[in-house]
């Protein structure tokens, strides 16, 4: 994983995120202690990814600055909730997505194959963090989306531990 837990927590604090809505996978999971102990934001756990989008919507409408964290398979599972929040309510919610099997050469994993086409179909502006040199993209893209008043996502490449 390119970011340590403390690096991701510090980045989110710098971005003034108020809430992290979280359903971790095995790659993002090691961030949990740092996210949980950060005094800068609250870590909110959900049982299903479809719960994350309306929770973020409510927080956003209440004046908070939430961010979602889940794996790309969770993005697929939560499509209807995403549609309601991003398109019906037109809320600029932002997500950090663990991109399953991204770094596995020749992977036949359908999550890897479908992630970008699904984000493209939804019209969600995203960037990919695939190595250490890409780390600044997370904060840059978050700021860009906030300034533009649009939803966005960062794909954190997974697959090599």
Image (tube, rainbow, N blue to C red):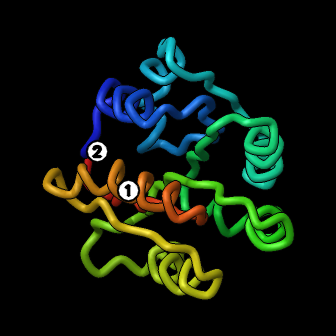
Residue for badge 1: 156
Q: Quadrant of residue 84?
A: bottom right
> Dots 1 and 2: beta carbons under 8 Å?
yes
Name the residue furthest front.
147
Vertical relation: 86 (above or below) 51: below
x and y percentages locating residue 45 in the rendered image = 70, 31
Classify mark 2: helix, strand or loop.
Answer: loop
Vertical relation: 24 (above or below) 16: below
Q: For marks 1 and 2, give the one nearer the viewer.
A: 1
Vertical relation: 127 (above or below) 131: below
Tag shown at residue 1: 2
Which residue occupies 64% across, 63% down? 75
Which residue occupies 47% across, 82% down? 113
Which residue occupies 69% across, 29% down? 44
x and y percentages locating residue 146 in the rendered image = 52, 55
**In this orientation, which residue lies closer to the viewer: 157 or 10?**
10
Question: In the shown orientation, is residue 37 left or right of residue 46?
Answer: left
Vertical relation: 149 (above or below) 45: below
Which residue occupies 62% across, 38% down? 65
**In this orientation, which residue lies closer to the viewer: 91 or 74?**
91
x and y percentages locating residue 127 in the rendered image = 37, 68
Classify mark 1: helix, strand or loop.
Answer: strand
- CA distance for labels 1 and 2: 8 Å
**In this orientation, which residue lies closer to the viewer: 48 or 81?**
81
**In this orientation, which residue lies closer to the viewer: 93 or 131?**
93
**Which badge, 1 or 2, comes first in the chain's sequence?**
2
């Amino acid at each position: 994983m390119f970011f340590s837990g403390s690096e991701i927590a510090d980045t989110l604090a710098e971005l003034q995120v108020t809430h992290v809505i979280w359903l971790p996978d095995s790659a993002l999971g090691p961030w949990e202690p740092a996210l949980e102990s950060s005094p800068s934001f609250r870590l909110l756990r959900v049982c299903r990814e479809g719960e994350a989008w309306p929770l973020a919507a409510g927080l956003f409408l209440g004046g908070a600055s939430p961010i979602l964290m889940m794996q790309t398979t969770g993005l697929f599972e939560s499509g209807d909730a995403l549609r309601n929040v991003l398109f019906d309510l037109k809320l600029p919610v932002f997500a950090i997505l663990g991109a399953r099997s991204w770094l596995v050469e020749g992977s036949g994993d359908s999550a890897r194959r479908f992630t970008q086409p699904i984000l493209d179909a939804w019209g969600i502006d995203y960037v990919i963090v695939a190595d250490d040199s890409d780390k600044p993209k997370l904060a840059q893209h978050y700021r860009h989306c906030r300034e533009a008043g649009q939803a966005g996502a960062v794909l954190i490449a997974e697959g090599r531990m």
